[in-house]
Amino acid sequence: MLKIENLDVFYGQAQVAFKISLHIKRGHFVGLFGRNGSGKSSVFRSIMGLKPPRVEGRILFNDTDITAKPSFTISKMGIGWVPEDRKIFPNITIKRNLQLGEKSNKALKSDRLFSYADAYRFFPKLYEMRDKLGSQMSGGEQQMLTIARTMMGNPSLLLLDEPTEGLAPNIARDVMKMILEIRKNFNTTTIVVEQFSETLLKHMDYCYVMEMGEIIFTGEPRLLLDDEGLQRRLLGVG
């Protein structure tokens, strides 16, 4: 579904990612792990066509080269992005935020579409607060809204950029649980950027680890789960 070939990523003259190559199969759940500053989020920005950064190499989505395409075109093609800073609209209601995530059903091929009912089922707090403004939400509630709003577009590929960053442990657990529930119900191909998450790793099909802009590990999740020494060496955890 997604192929990244020899991707170099630059901010001005500074290169932050070097010869990144990823292969994401349809229906898979994939982790892109690494410490802060390793270049993970820059890879996501590159996939979405956001500037900065500037990229060299190729990004293929369903065999179409999207490297030079604008971000609104990439979104319409079926890639949904949940950014680390959430980017909700603070001065409109939660229900209106969700509505802005919708895409025309004519562009959607799946018979099983994510709806308002699904948003409220997976995240009951959104239903309770549906008429409140985005500015009245806590950080955890904003994260729930951002995930639900992105899913309202029914993406075929979902990019989650550090979905538990800055959340209290109990809220982070709830968010991870809902991510897994959505995956189970919709089988959306998903890539998650995190520093490390043993909870999510147990459910993944494949994982990558980045360090200083390079891929330093590719393999099955069990290789990381079962080897604390490898976790310490690659990620500083374990």
Image: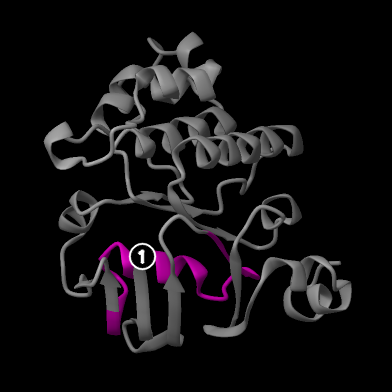
Residue lying furthest left: 106
Q: Is residue 81 above or below residue 22?
A: above
Quadrant of the drawing holding the N terminus: bottom left
Q: Amino acid at mark 1?
A: Arg
**In the displayed structure image, the side of residue 204 where residue 51 appears, left or right:** left
The x and y percentages for residue 230 are 81, 78
Q: Is residue 27 magenta?
A: no
User: Percent x, y for residue 146?
Assistant: 43, 36
- Is 203 placed left or right of 30 in the picture? right
Quadrant (top left/top right/bottom left/bottom right) for the C terminus: bottom right
Residue 37 vs 193, above or below: the answer is below
The residue tagged 1 is 45
Instruction: Report which quarter residue 176 is drawn in.
Output: top right
Q: Residues within 10 Å of mark 1 (few under 14, many from 20)?
A: many
Residue at left offset 56%, top offset 83%: 215
Q: Is residue 93 visible?
A: no
Circle 1 SS class: helix
Residue lying furthest front: 111
Front position in the image: 78 or 69: 78
Horizontal and vertical percent position of residue 112: 34, 32
Residue 40, magenta (yes or no): yes
The magenta region covers: 29-58
